[in-house]
Amino acid sequence: MSVNNGVDVEQLGQAVEAITEEPAIGRFQFRAETEWTEGLQCVTTIDDFDQAGDRIHTQEFTIEGDEPEQILGKRTAPNAVELLLAALGSCLSVGYVANAAAMGIELDDLRFELEGDVDLRGFLGISEDVRAGYKSVTCTTYIDADTSAEELAELRDRVEATSPLMDSIVNAVPLETAVVAVRGDE
């Protein structure tokens, strides 16, 4: 067994081969359920997902959300736009570690600093000329690895070309919404 950066490189290769031979194995549907608790606070529960049409039950996770006091919250948890930065950092971390392992690059340290600029005039409906979401996001990657600048550039290119979160942020993702009125016993 060859392990690099905590990743079983042989098992990674086998997964790539299996998905190449049978693409359905690589099809996942993830889900989350968010419930408002009070004020501007909510809790998101993540439990199961589908892989190739099979429901996979795993450990349940909860993620709390809130807003800073300056936006009428209590700051008991990060807000949604901060969680997006965290999700992007997590996705890039996975991408860098797995791709570095596959390329034979041993990482000594890896971290990301992410920043995003939001103008609340868009969110509050004050100005139609201002986006409701991030105006821009920057990500600085710090890597400590015994490898060449060329290999690090190749690693970056691989990660950025295959990051699901980067792809979802950079490219428009179709989003369907629905509202279901739920009333008590009438």
Image: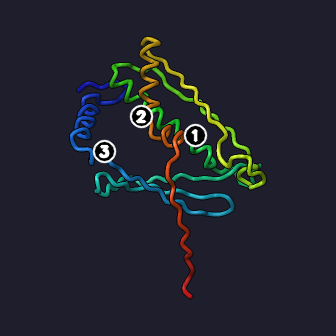
Give yes or no for contact between labels 3 and 1 (Cβ–Cβ under 8 Å). no
Q: Which mark is residue 85?
A: 1
Residue of label 2: 162
The amino acid sitting under disc 3 is Gly
Q: Is residue 69 visible?
A: no
Residue nearest the viewer, comparing 170 with 30: 170
Q: Nearer the viewer, mark 1 or mark 2?
A: 2
**Secondary element type, mark 2:** helix
- Point out the tag, 2 or 3, that comes first from the N-terminus: 3
Upstream in sequence: badge 1 or badge 2 = 1
Looking at numbered disc 1 in the image, what kind of residue is underneath it? Leu
Image-based side of 99 in relation to 125, left or right: left
Spatial CA span between label 1 and label 2: 17 Å
Residue occupying image coordinates x 30% and y 45%: 26
Tell me residue 142's x, y (percent). Answer: 54, 22
Compute the Cα span from label 3 to label 1.
25 Å
Name the residue located 27 percent from the left edge and 35 percent from the top edge: 16
* Location of mark 3 (residue): 26
